[in-house]
Structure formats: C-alpha cells, structure tokens
Image (cartoon, grey):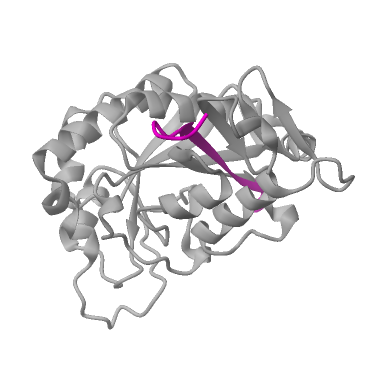
Amino acid sequence: MIPCITKKYQNVVISTGNIINNELGQRKSNEELYDGLKITLHSDPNVDRVVVEIDERHGRVQHATQELTNRLTENQRFEISIGAKIFLNTNSTVYIEQAVEALLTILNVTHVDNVVLAYHPNAASGTTLPVANATAESTTPTAAPAVKSPCSEANPTPSSVASWSLRNGASGVTDLKQLYGSLEQYALNQKITQLGIADLDAEALAELHKTASVAPTIAQVNLSTCCRVPTELQEFCAAHDIQLNTHGDPELLLPEEQFSALAPGYTIDWSLRYQVHVRCRGVLTAKGYIVGASRSPNASA
C-alpha cells in the first residue's frame, strides 16, 4: 500500500483517474470503485506503467492525473458535458463541500454541468438496494423527460423508490434539505449548472422542491428490484420539468469492511462518480471515482 496515507494524514482524498483506460468501466458501480481504489492504493508507484501522484500538502492520492487532464482538454470546455453523482450516507454539509471542491480541483475545471445527490442515511443498516446492470447508470440527462427501464414493465412488484420517506422520516427530509442547500450555493455561484436528486419518492421530492432556491431538474430512481415508477412521481416530474432517469447504484457504494481492507484505519466519508461526455457525439470519454476518507478514532498511530 502507498505509505503516505497509512499514518500521516487524518483526512485523505483518493482519485482513481479515468477508469475507462483500466478496463474497469461499464461494470457495477461498487465493483468499479473497489477495483479502481485497489489499483490506486496497491500498485507499485515505481513501476513505469503505473502513474500514481501523491500530493502530500493536501493529502491526495491521484492515479493517472495527466491522462485524465488530456481527456478533459482534448475538446473545448463547451464541447464536453461533465456530470457527477455524490454518494453520502452521513448528514454533513462539510462532506458535500469537500466532495464538490475535490471534483472541481482534480478535474481542474471552474464548473460542472450537473451534480446528483444520493443520500441514504440508513444504508449502513444493511437495507441497501442490490446493484443492477452498470449500463443503467447515468448522470447526464437527455432532452426529453422519459423513463428508461432496465427490465420488462410486466413485473407487478411495487417500486422500492416509494420507501424513502418511510425509511428516513421527517428528520431525513430536513437533513436532505440542508445537504441540498450546500449544493445550491455552488449552483448560485455558477459552479454547478444543474442539480439532481436520487431515489426520492414523490412526497419527499415535492417537499424538497417546495423550499429549494435552485429546483432540482434531474431525478434518478433505482429500479433494480422492480420496473414500475410510481405514477405520482412520474406526474410530479412531468409537471415540474424534471428529467426522470433510472440507475443501478447501491445505496451503500462500498461497505466499510471492503474499504478497510484497502486502506486500513480509514473510513469513507463520501464518494462520487464523474462522467465526461462529448456533447455532439454523446461519447463517454472519461469516467472515474473520487473518495474522501478519514482516520477512524480508534485507529493506531
């Protein structure tokens, strides 16, 4: 393991670089993240084909930074669309700020086109959704508010998307509003063009929309356990010009024990996935993950 994060830093940021070149793309998101982190943290930095950069001042470990920069600059900024999805299981506006700042810094851009927030405070309890096909995930909305289903609509099982409010309650909605408010500040400062939210039922989405200064224009639903989006959610999104997409990401992107095996003594605070598309062709040119982690209170020095 790269020694710089074993004892020296309380907080670290780990960037997988462009995983498309590592042949990790188009897989399940939890597999992509785990393998991307494994390559970044456990490869020998002295091997020529492995390019791992260590920013000791800021506690960052970054893989293939130059290759990612090349991908981002081979087209003009207006010719590419950069979308990201933040995965958060703890109510912390600080984590939101850390994630966005890391995204802008590592990609070396002044703004991104859209950011979707997936907040699941009860995911650690083991009630996570299973991962569907990785090809179902998307952070870049299409022009029409159509719902894309990864399976047959003949399945009569009610969608699990309807359970967010029941599982997280009024306090969960209150916390979500605070987290979303942090993203709104970046939108108001023109650092994020569009905001989105993942896995909310119609009731929670309506409550968030009612108080939002920057209304969400993207809504993602997880259809890995069924194929029917609730009618109320479809109607609300259509009435408020919200693009409704499906995805296959688990609520808990990487369990604590898996990350601990890669970075002993550290726990994940937040994680995000970014995708870079060439607008005119719709080609995915870069995709990667960034993780923020901190040393566990009981970790040995």
The location of residue 262, given as percent across then percent down, is 57, 49
* Image-based side of 223 in relation to 301, left or right: left
Determine the residue positioned at 68% across, 35% down.
3
| Quarter placement of the N terminus | top right
The location of residue 133, given as percent across then percent down, is 48, 69
Question: In this view, which residue lies farthest toward the bottom?
Answer: 154
The image quadrant of residue 9 is top right
Question: Is 233 a magenta residue?
Answer: no
Nearest the viewer among 40 and 228 is 40
Nearest the viewer among 101 and 244 is 101
Determine the residue positioned at 25% across, 42% down.
240
Whether 212 is drawn above or below 220: the answer is above
Whether 258 is drawn above or below 4: the answer is below
The image quadrant of residue 26 is bottom right
Q: Can residue 18 be seen in this view?
A: no
Determine the residue positioned at 30% across, 78% down.
153
Question: Is 288 a magenta residue?
Answer: yes
Nearest the viewer among 148 and 198 is 198
The location of residue 132, given as percent across then percent down, is 43, 68
Whether 244 is drawn above or below 70: the answer is below
The image quadrant of residue 188 is top left
Stretch in magenta: 280-301
Q: Is residue 171 visible?
A: yes
The location of residue 173, given as percent across then percent down, is 17, 38
How many numbered markers are drawn?
0
